[in-house]
Every structure is written in C-alpha cells, then in structure tokens.
Amino acid sequence: MPTTQRPDGAYNPLDKHNLGTNVGDALLARPVVSLPPPAFPGAGVLPENEDDADAIMQLPAETLALMSWEEEVREIHRRRRLAKQQGGKEGIAKQHARGRLTIRERVDALLDPGSFQEQGQATAIPDYGDNDELTGFVPANYVVGFGRIEGRRVVVGGEDFTLKGGSPNAAGLRKSVYAEHLAVQYRVPLVRSLEGGGGSVKGGGGRRGGTVGEPVYASPRFRIIADAMGEVPVVSMAAGAVAGFPAGRLVASHFSIMTRHTAQVMIGGPALVERALGVSLTKDELGGAHVHAKSGIVDNIAEDEYDLFSQVRRFLGYLPSNIHQRAPRIASEDDPERMEEELLTAVPRDSNAPFDMREIIAMIMDRDSFFEIAPGYGTSQIAGLARLDGQPVGVLANDNRVYAGAMTADAGQKYRRFVEMCDTFHLPVVNFIDQPGFMIGPEAERNGTIRYGMAAVCAAAQASVPWAAIQVHKGFGVATAAHYAPDNYVLAWPSVESGALPLEGGVAVAFHREIAAADDPEAKRRELEDRLRSARSPYPRAESFAVHELIDPRETRPTLCRWVDWIQPRLDELKGPTRFPMRP
C-alpha cells in the first residue's frame, strides 16, 4: 500500500488518512511519530509506545476531530432513530385508533423479549438538498430481521401500515423481497405480518426515460416464495386489511391466520370491486373472518392480535426449523401407558348414531396437545398437530357429524395440503378413520369433488413419512384410500365396518327389486341390512393379517406410543427435500 513520506523519510499518519495537505503542512513543525501501517484495512493507526501515543494526543483538538469518524457515526444513529419513527406520532395514533398494533409492536409482542435483530435499520427514501445535506427521510415501510420464539431463531417481517397504508415504497419493497431469501439462506422459519394493499398506481406515473420493470434475466419473483415453502416453515398473520400481493403471500404459507374483528383479506378492495363489477361492499363483507374461516384462505381465526401471536408460537413448536432437521421431541409428563375407559363406549353400537371424534383424539394424544388447523373449512375432515409421548405428529380424522364424514371438494383440498405439509417437514401421521366415501349429489358434482378427493388419495399414496391408520368406524369406497400410506401401521377397533359401499346405500342399489317387491319394503330393507352387517365382523381381517392388530380401543394410546418409539430411527434419516413439497 503506498504511503506519503516526509522529506526525512518518516511515515506521516495524517497524510495516510487523507486529511489534506493543509493539515499536513500545518504540522510540519511538530515532531512526527514514526508508525507502522495499519495491521489490516480499516484498523486505524496504532502507536508502538507511550511516547508515540502522547505525541498523537498532543495534536490540536481540531486535528483529532478530523481523525475521528464520530460525526458520521452520530449520523448513522440519527438515521436509525428516524427510521423507527414509522409514520410519525399521527400515523401511529391512527393505527391504534383502529384497534391495531404497529408492525414494531407486533414484532416485540411475538418474539422473545429483546431478541429482535433488525436488518437494514436505516433503509429509507432520502431527500438531499443542493449541498448534499439530508432534507427528508421516509423510512422503508417494511421491517425485517431475526428474532427468537421460545429460544429458536426465526425471521420475522411485515408491512408498516402507518406509512402509505403498507403499500411498499421503493425501500420497503426491497426489504420485503429479502424476507424469504433471509429465511431460506439461514434455514429458519419465516413469520410474516401482513397489512397493506400491495402496489399502487401512484408509483407508475413517473417521468419517461427511466429504467422500468425487471431485467429479463431476473429470477421469477414468486420462485423464492415457492422455494421457501419447500425449505422452512412459513407462517402468515393478518391483523388488518390485506389485499393484492400481500394476500397472495398470505395463502403461500404452511399456516395462515387472521384476527376476527380487525382483519380482512381480499384480492381487490371495495373501490376496485365497485369500479370493475358495480358491486358495493365493505371490506368486511368482502373478506372478513366470517368469509375466510369457511373459504380456506386462512387456516385459523384469532380473537385478537395476542391470540394470533400465541397460535403462531404454538404452531411453530410442532415443526423443525427447516427440512434438514427433525421436529423437536420433548419430554412428556403424560403416561404413555394411559388408557381411558371412555374409549370403550366412544363409538355407539348404532351405526348411524354420531359421536365426537375430537374427544377420541384428545383421550389418545398427549393431554392438551392437539392443535386443530382450519376447523371451519372442509369441516367433514379434521386436521391438526399433536404430540404422542412428546413426539410431534400430524393428526387426520373424519367428523361424522358433518355429512357423516364424507369427503367433500373442500375437505379433499384441506386433506391434501395437510398431508403435503407433514411430508415436507417429516412429521409422522396418525389417521383416525370413519370414512363413508366421497360426497355425492349435484352440488358435489359441480364442485369437482372426485378431482380434489383423488388429489388427497394421491398425496397419501406418495407420502414418505411413518403413518398409523386406526380403523375406528366406517371405511368405504375409493375415498378410504386417502387414509393409508406406504408401509402404514394399521390398527382396527371392534366397531369398524368396511367395504366397497356403505351398507345402506349398497343394499338400496343391490337389492332394489327385492325391496320394491316386498309386502313391507322398509322391513325387508332392515332385514337385509342386519344380515349383511353381521357378516362385516372385524375378526376375519385380523385372522387374515389384513390389519396389524385388532385392539381394545383403550389400548390405542399405549400401542401408538410404542409405535412412536419404533419409528425414531426412521425419523432420524428422514431429512431434506421431498418429492412434492406443500404448495398453496
């Protein structure tokens, strides 16, 4: 590295730091300290002994100030403070008046205290005067960084609605794009806090002649969003209005959740809908929680923002940080040998009488561990996460109180997504079966039930995770195939019935002439049903080794907990990408 020499050959540290010839000339009369070059770039000049240090300290104060970066450092900290002002006191007050937290308040409430490490702390849109002085400073309206949830590192990011209503400014857009990249790069879960309307027409009216659009060689914008879903857990929260691109991000998640009273999710807002379709609706009428709890756009509804944060933390607790790790198994205080007496009477002897499958799940899983996902969508199918002897598992079941548990079009879509999520993160599946078949009828045909039902069947058929199937009650038709995966462990309760068709429908089809010709058709139908039902005993399947075990229902938890121990070596090996990661 070149240096500037005094006529006597001594090394001049002031010239080395480019302080200018005027300063150097002013000091020619003072003793010059001979110092070595910096040990590494940016390391500064280090005196060799106390005399050299004293000589430097005896320089005039104005010269020492020129040697310091204090002014620039103060400016760095000033800009960081400006960036945290968000939309100012007025903008923050408006956000609070709507009953909503700001993005920075949400980050603090979600994460472990003091764990947030922001990325791009001074990112902004600045304005400079003629003398290059800073005259304006609009913070990036997207906040992103690392944090911890229950001690585990995550990436969290979200729009700042106090600035431009969350519609990204140029600086905010770059940070929002970075969120998925950051999570994938460091292999940690991504939590998005969404609130805003995406792009704005105001951003497209600039002067002509500038550079516009993305370069033709740029990677597709949605590639990293899709890739993230195959690499790390992705969670999206909506606590305010979400429209356009943010709504697309919301559904591109493994778990999406919105608040009941303050959030709405829409492709286009009321003004756009009225202009395009002539329909006048409020935000809540378009996309409130009462709409999307049933549409499947969001999985769960939170009563308020703090309930929202609690559900997010709980969901992530069942999953690994990325596909290259195992889901965290924890010590369980629930006895793996526990047997609940109520399971013996949980399924009525009357084949058509309904019962509560969720109560059965609760009695078998670790106490208070079942976390249901999308309870308001595809309601004939139950899906959720739980623990068995501390091991996180995916749980699937039929709710016979809704269409007798038949698989509808939306239930098939819910089922497929859940199986793909479990497969992506290598979670074992426990499936409680009471399946009467695909939903039938004109509405089922209009909804394309057979297509979405077969997608669920294929998802299970290609699953790579350990799978336990418990035959609880009914198992009829092609839809039953969705409840079994390769190398599954099959247990049967004595209450199980199975076949090509449900008994009642099968008798009506196969014996319709005989029933119609009888003196008492109804009595004849009951006679045929009773005779055929007696032939559907579960014992022949056990005798033929068509199931692994025919068990007392009370034995289900101990049997499954032993299975959990058996599969541990396999779970150690199940890491990395799957053939079909979850997609929206």
Image (cartoon, rainbow, N blue to C red):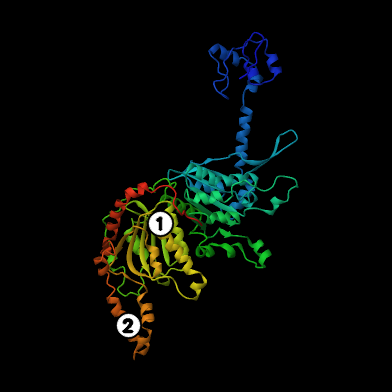
Q: Is residue 407 left or right of residue 290?
A: left
Contact (CB < 8 A) between labels 1 and 2?
Answer: no
Which of discs 1 and 2 lies nearer the camera? The answer is 1
Q: Indicate the position of residue 509 as horizontal and vertical percent values.
A: 39, 80
Q: Indicate the position of residue 557 as horizontal and vertical percent values.
A: 29, 58
Q: Is residue 497 above or below residue 115?
A: below
**Circle 2 residue:** 526
Q: Please, what is the three-letter code of the amino acid marked with disc 1? A: Ala
Q: Please, what is the three-letter code of the amino acid marked with disc 2? A: Arg
> For this rendering, which residue is in front, 298 or 367?
298
Q: Which image quarter holds the N terminus?
A: top right
**Circle 1 residue:** 463
Q: Residue at position x 53%, y 47% from top?
A: 180
Q: Is residue 45 above or below residue 496?
A: above
Residue 240, can we see it?
Answer: no
Q: Indicate the position of residue 313 as horizontal and vertical percent values.
A: 45, 50
Q: Is residue 198 above or below residue 33?
A: below
Q: Residues within 10 Å of mark 2 (few under 14, many from 20)?
A: some
Q: Residues within 10 Å of mark 1 (few under 14, many from 20)?
A: many
Residue 263, by quadrant, is bottom right
